Image (cartoon, helix red, strand yellow):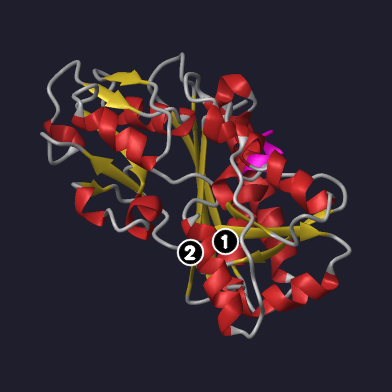
Amino acid sequence: MWQAEHVQALLQAQGHSVALLGMTTQGDQILDRSLSKVGGKGLFVKELEVALEEGRANLAVHSLKDVPMDLPEGFDLACVMTREDPRDAWVSSKYAHLNDLPHGAVVGTSSLRRTVLLRALRPDLKIEPLRGNLDTRLRKLDEGQYDGIVLAAAGLKRLGLGERIRHIFETTEMLPAAGQGALGIEVRSHRADVAQALAPLADAATWLTVTAERAVSRAMGGSCSMPLAAHATLTDGVLRLQAAWGDPEGAPVLLRAETQQAMNAADPASRELARQLGEAVAAQLRSLGAH
């Protein structure tokens, strides 16, 4: 709802009339199993796509890391907005940092990516599933079910819960998920009028970096069942892309790959270069044994 209201306010500031169509997705309803076991990221977008297809909605606002890498035919990602903090956050009532946890402490996350990254940092910890909206996850922590949990910094900050963050992991510690912290807006492919209305909300640099990240994930067959991290930055005209893969059942070791290339975010052709960069990094990971 925060995301939808944020886009609504920005569009209204552009002179558009915008009403919200509140919906609950399967991803919001199935809370007793990890996403990788019940259908993956698409659980958060399917109902919204049906509303678009039936004409009940003109656009759908998504957290981009929840959007499948390939959209159904007839749907387009029409806008990627300025990114909030893409990093992961450590939240705990007792421990200021992951390093402060005693041997065997319980950490909550249902992300396979965070699981393999946490295991690489602290193989002695017990990683337990954690589902539900932000309030539910924080309540479970406060009830003592976990010694600490890992959440997206962006979600906590957007909802005014930044004070719950004890530590933000640098990308050198925990590499974010593809698209983490960015909002994507989906429309029907034929709605050029809606895409045109969204154009002022787009951020070219964010769109370029998430294109590279999502290309890694797409080339690896990425979904919630893929323990993959991918993160890109654009600094002084150079796009740097890093990725990491780990086996949640195997040794707590990460396979890493990275590359970089000069790019101009304002040049529409750069998105194709970013896709190629992502595919090259995925090929590096596969050559190292990722699958």
Q: How crowded is mark 1: few (under 14 residues within 10 Å), some or many (20 or more)?
A: many
Q: Is residue 66 magenta?
A: no
Instruction: Tell me, for residue 25, which label it has, or none.
Output: none
Q: Is residue 220 magenta?
A: yes
Q: Where is residue 28 in the image (x, y as percent from the top left)?
A: 53, 35
Residue 7: which quarter of the image? bottom right
Query: Residue 106 at what x, y percent from top left?
Result: 24, 21
Q: Looking at numbered disc 1 in the image, what kind of residue is underneath it?
A: Thr
> Which numbered dot is residue 83?
2
Classify mark 2: residues with Cα within 10 Å, few (<14), some (14-19) or many (20+).
Answer: some
Magenta region: 217-222
Q: Which of 266 and 110 is in front in this view?
A: 110
- What residue appears at the point 23 percent right and 40 percent down from the top-left corner? 91
Q: Which residue is drawn at 57% across and 69% down?
A: 8
Side (left or right) of 230 relative to 197: left
Name the mark on residue 209.
1
Q: Can residue 261 be seen in this view?
A: no
Identify residue type, mark 2. Answer: Arg
